[in-house]
Amino acid sequence: MPANSASQIRVAGTGKVLIANITTPAVASPADTKAAWPTGWTELGYTSTDGVKLAKKDKIDQVDGWQSVSALRYIHSDRELTVKFQLLQFNKDTLPFFMGGGTTAAVSGTGVEAGTFKYDLTANPAANEKQLGFEFTDQSGTDTVTYRLIIPRGQVTETEEISMTRTGALRLGVTFTAYAQDDITKPLATWLMKDAAYA
């Protein structure tokens, strides 16, 4: 194949973000891009037109020596993988995900209006680890190309302020950070690609 190949340019035309609980045993991940996401994965619905932003940052420290102006070697001291997106839907899955865990519940009692629900934001936050999945599809010529990214362990580590105005939809902006698994030989994240460019 020639070095310059327009067929290998990817556009994340449409996609989705999903989460799953970390349980024992863990909710299964799909084996390929054709299989449906297994039971236990929940799609979080519409996201803003900014889509999903994936960032990988490695910190490399250099070792210097008296006898050399150049570094003698480099040591990997940190690796961070984050996924950032803004959710547009408010429901029993998205609000607790943004707020850091917990559940919504129906409110009942004398004089309470039917269909009222509540969410309590705890004063003592706890870990709210999840699995995260991201998928996008690109129509490249006559081929449909699908990518899936699966992060088996992580949590929301940063949230954006919610702007409430009459001129725009509310957005739940989050940054999800990948954590190492207990078995450190397992990957931080896995890409699945239905893409002939990798053949």
Image (spheres, grey):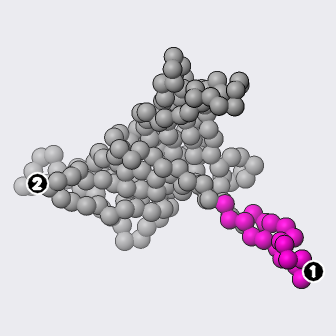
Q: Is residue 6 above or below residue 128?
A: above
Mark number for residue 42? none
* Picture layout, residue 8 above or below residue 60: above
- In percent of width and height, residue 195 lies at 61, 26
What residue is pinned by disc 1? 67
Q: Amino acid at mark 2?
A: Val
Q: Secondary structure at mark 1?
A: loop
Q: Residue furthest top?
A: 142
Does the rendering let one see residue 9?
Answer: yes
Q: Foreground residue, 30 or 54?
A: 54
Res. 102 visible in picture: no
Give percent across and percent down for residue 40. Answer: 47, 37
Residue 9 or residue 196, whichever sits in front: 9
Q: Is residue 89 left or right of residue 133?
A: left
In the rendered structure, find residue 112 and report the number of the disc placed on it.
2
Image quarter where the C terminus lies is: top right
Question: Reading the chain from its start, which is encountered first: label 1 or label 2?
Answer: 1
Measuring 25% from the left and 61% from the top, which residue is drawn there? 163
* Three-letter residue code for mark 1: Gln
77 sits to left or right of 147: right
